[in-house]
Amino acid sequence: MKKNIAVCLSPALLNLYEIEQSIVVVIDVLRATSSITYGIENGAKAIIPVMEVEECLNYAKDGFLLAAERNGEVVSGFDFGNSPFSYSKEKVANKTIVLTTTNGTKSLRMAQERAHTVVIGSFLNLDALCNWLKSQNKDVLLLCSGWKDKFNLEDTLFAGAVAENLKNDFEFSDDACVAAQDMYVLAKDDLRGYLRKSSHNARLEKLNIENDVVFCLQTNICTAIPILNGDKLEALV
Amino acid sequence: MKKNIAVCLSPALLNLYEIEQSIVVVIDVLRATSSITYGIENGAKAIIPVMEVEECLNYAKDGFLLAAERNGEVVSGFDFGNSPFSYSKEKVANKTIVLTTTNGTKSLRMAQERAHTVVIGSFLNLDALCNWLKSQNKDVLLLCSGWKDKFNLEDTLFAGAVAENLKNDFEFSDDACVAAQDMYVLAKDDLRGYLRKSSHNARLEKLNIENDVVFCLQTNICTAIPILNGDKLEALV
């Protein structure tokens, strides 16, 4: 019998889903989960997601890299935020990074409380992630981090990309999965153009991170799948 | 300056929206808000939405019609549930109906707590509703009732129909509005066919309410706009 796949459009709806036996894929493609994927691909030993900026600071003495983003910007005094360009091989190989972000780390922690397994998804590791999900014989929940608990287009498009990839192997078990897949099919030939329709777009443009956005919309430049082991995201092996 | 329009995809997300100065359109097209529209169109004096089946019973002595639906079925002992065919002129003209439903009455009550104005939307009164919204100079929130707080396709499609109609007169202020509009444009030539993709579809087919579904997807057979005055839905005049 096929396993189920569902899409949770906001962390605020996560309590509606039974995930105790499921793999939860946490999605925050602009930019946390893209940067995490890229960092793990580039040999970071681990990435530790924490909820608060202050928690990040507790790790300073251990020689970890400290990364903090709030409202799209690097928090002052930190090594970096969540731009993928900060997660290059030169910067992160063999390092442990402690990371807090506006949306992504929150949904990671919420998923961790109940899920069987928590992994990280982004366009960068789309095929690797989907192939692995097909091999697991588990129900899957795609958890969109959204923007401050609101629905957003970019995370839903990525959920739709996964749904499209898995449609022959899984049963869609909620309407959000159907909607996400249709939106992805509509947008896939020009993801960047589609996202210009986002209410978010003006905010992104103000942040001057166009290069980051374009980077995060690349597909399959990574094969790493970050998985949560205890408090740490590490490469799935 | 244009007013804003936004779409709330689930009652569980309503707290994210400031609605104190807004018109909230409550949407539960299969079937509560379609039946309410049809009943008011057909001369019902008022429809009183209540949260619990027991509350409904309190009105029995007043000679009101009692309507109660749970999980898609008429609750035993009640005059009727939320099939639009129960809201015909013969049955409801000059009557007051007390109604409780699984999803629609809940979102109505939630909206009422904070909104400036609460009205009812359905495909049946689409154009009348949109024309009135254009005349009001107020921000608009389209509140999808969903299914037990989960996203559903049918309410989102209707929100998209309103967004499509209002796109030149309002600013879209969230991503859900963009997504709903795109889904509607994708589905509009065959709404019934599109809804067969819904996870909900199997449930609807079991209820044997195909005639109700087809009825509720008709556009513009009504001009009535039910509006909440105190505890009662009445015709906007």
Image: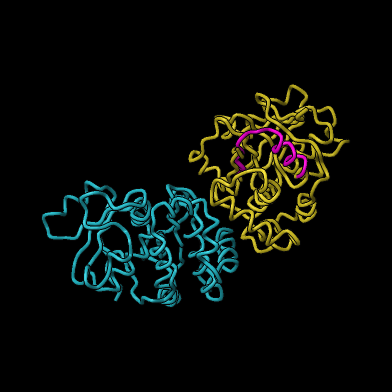
Chain colours: A cyan, B yellow
Which residue is rendered at x = 59% and y = 50% of the image? B177
Magenta part of the protein: which range? B127-143
Number of labels in the image equals 0
On the image, the x and y values in percent for residue A132 come to 40, 76
Q: Is A83 a magenta residue?
A: no
Residue that sits furthest to the left in the current view: A61
Between A218 and B111, the residue placed more toward the observer is A218
On the image, the x and y values in percent for residue A99 come to 26, 57
Q: Is residue B77 left or right of residue A64?
A: right
Between A190 and A164, the residue placed more toward the observer is A190
Q: Is B128 a magenta residue?
A: yes
Q: Tell me where residue A179 sits by quadrant.
A: bottom right
Q: Tell me where residue B186 sits by quadrant.
A: bottom right
On the image, the x and y values in percent for residue B86 come to 80, 41
Q: Tell me where residue A83 sits by quadrant.
A: bottom left
Between A29 and A179, the residue placed more toward the observer is A29
Residue B52 in sight: no
Between B9 and B30, the residue placed more toward the observer is B9
Residue A19 in sight: yes
On the image, the x and y values in percent for residue B68 come to 69, 38
Q: Eyeballing the image, is B40 above or below A73?
A: above
Q: Is residue B138 left or right of residue A154?
A: right
Which residue is rendered at x = 42% and y = 51% of the image? A206
Which residue is rendered at x = 43% and y = 77% of the image? A131
Which residue is rendered at x = 51% and y = 63% of the image? A157
